Image: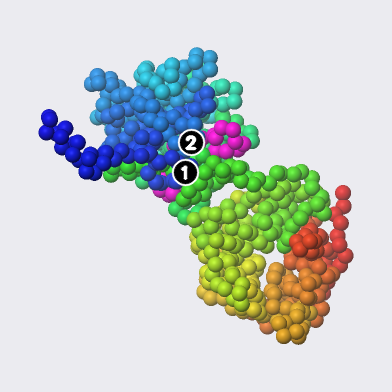
Amino acid sequence: MRKAILCLFLFTVVFGPPMVAQAQHHTSFQPGEIWEDTDGVHINAHGGGILYHDGVYYWYGEHKGKTSKAHVGINVYSSNDLYNWKKEGVALSVSEDPDSEITAGSVMERPKVIYNESTEQYVMWFHLELKDQGYSAARTGLAVSDSPTGPFEYQKSFRPNAKQWPVNFEEAWKSPKPGEDTLEWWTPEWHEAIEEGLFVRRDFEKGQMSRDMTLFVDEDGTAYHIHSAEDNLTLHISELTDDYLDFTGKYIRVKPGGHNEAPAIFQKDGWYYLIASGATGWDPNAARSFRAKSIWGPWEELNNPAIGKDSDVTFHSQSTFVLPVQGKEDAFIFMADRWKPENHIDGRYIWLPIEVVNGQPVIRWRDEWSLDFFERRRFPIRQDVPLDSIILSDPSILADSETETYYMTGTGGLLWESKDLKFWDGPYEVAMTDPSSWMGLNPMIWAAELHQYKGKYYYFATFTNRDVQIDTVRGNAIDRRASHVLVSDKPGGPYVPMEDPTYLPADEPTLDGTFWVGEDGKPYMIFCHEWLQNWNGTMEKIELKPDLSGTVGGREILFRAKDSPWSEEEYEDGSAGPSKVTDGPYLFRTETGRLGMIWTSWVHDVYTQGVAYSESGTIDGPWVQEEEPITPPNFGHGMLFRTLEGKLLMVAHSHKSVNGRYIRYPHYFEVDISGDKLKVGKIYQPKN
């Protein structure tokens, strides 16, 4: 013993005191990375949920070892800032009693804790599988405590809602159908039987299965238990008793036969939102989302909330909880686990901010982020704003007959909505770009346009990543800029990325892409190669894939800026000639069938719009420029649209420089294409 002490003393003298792991103080979230607690140990709280109580966040989760079986129990951590977590200990320990339902070797998953104000008890529910029974028990377990950190006392487990029919269960479904027990799984007949309650009837007497689960406390204090039932084929939402210790027997089925698990729920602006996953074991899959005005439904199925790279596998994770951030408006965090079945203790946590755009939850990947995300500039939504009070460059309007609404966007990428063209509501953020793409975290958006095509809505826009430079020409640094296309099922968005990460060459700045279907029936993008690089801007075309998710083949030049007879600028040698700028193409056909293109350039410092016509009647041209501009001076970047009543109009912006800053407002013009040329008339004022 003395020899050991002497050795330690000599080691200390020579090498200094033994090193103690120093915990890193976190100031941000880094999804997928090792997340150390205040002791410097990777947090072990998988399938977790958060309770916020008396100014403190408590994170409850499964203690994972090499396998998924419980040998410790449910851990609890505390935090004041959501970044730095102190391990408080084991909230609910496995039992040393081999006959206990929660004995070591059982499966205790997805614990959630809520606080009951009336009883002053902390109530934990979790998914329990009995030892050595695989996942056949499918029970929900209950434990309670007088303290948020425990210890929690185990109460019971059971299958809920025994001998109770779901609220949204048809009377005819309560009786079995001949031969249903012999149906072959996954056949159409079997799927139909599942939707009509085959497994609800099967489990009616002993109670419904309860596997992946979460809890939700509504604004009135009513608590709900949401869980995967019917062999993970259907989600059930069940009401809990006032003390949160049992089920009332009132429950509904959500998306019967949809194969949804890993539920997570939150509420915003009068809507309940539910995020779930598919059922593919430990392997990740695409998330699903739903919404309803009442927690009792009906629940409307939405899209995959994850967008961008790896969205088809939810960034290699599975949902577990949605955390409302206290003290911040509309601030919700998507909590998910990145499972490591080969070594469960190495599982990682994916925490990402949730955005809700036009009723659709959106989750975008971020390598690192902080709660400042929720403090970012938000655009207050205004109502009944007159057109002449909206500052907007490069306006574009889509008149949607299905919603009987006009949608206006442009530079900045925000969306305005109107029923009459006179008063507008907005602006709404609808462009959900992928921060991990070439566009970066916060791309500038120019000249956004909306187009309806084959049942979808497409958002053509110019995106600029100011953190990446692709070239320097004549002393001008050129940022990474390109035209790109996003898609949505609805005109109000959200608009999200599609298949191809790029549409146009990465080493060339392109802009102002617009849409046209050629005489060959193929879709095309018409765009500009910016003058900053080639010093004589070009108008070009490129074919798009049938679903507009990318481009096909190479581009072709249609004409160059200096082909214009009406634009003019002063050159470096003092002489004058056509401007080098191409801007804002938009194609149309006259009623005589002539193909035209309006586009914008400059007459010295005057923003000006002209028109060209195709001699062949196709986008291949040749394109012949009209001699004179078609709009008054300092009006440009126009596009044509028909009102819901069928009247053809042009929307373009006015241009004025005030103290070195361009001020631009959208205006309507009457237009006539009854002949073989576009004629622009007077400014149009919508009637009351």
- Comparing 320 with 203, the one in front is 320
* Residue at the image position 73 percent from the left and 78 percent from the top: 579
Could you classify mark 2 by the number of other residues whose Cα lies within 10 Å: few (under 14), some (14-19), or many (20 or more)?
some
Say if 77 sits above or below 525 in the image: above
**Are the residues at dot 2 and dot 1 in contact (C-beta closer than 8 Å)?**
yes
* Residue at the image position 57 percent from the left and 73 percent from the top: 472
Callout 1 secondary element: loop
The quarter of the rendered structure image containing the N terminus is top left
Is residue 445 toward the left or the right of residue 138 in the image?
Answer: right
Callout 2 secondary element: loop
* Residue at the image position 49 percent from the left and 31 percent from the top: 80
Q: Which residues are magenta?
A: 312-332
Mark 2–mark 1 Cα distance, whole angstroms, equals: 9 Å
Residue 313 rendering spot, x and y as whole percentages: 43, 49
Residue 599 rendering spot, x and y as whole percentages: 73, 72
Disc 1 target residue: 29
Disc 2 target residue: 82
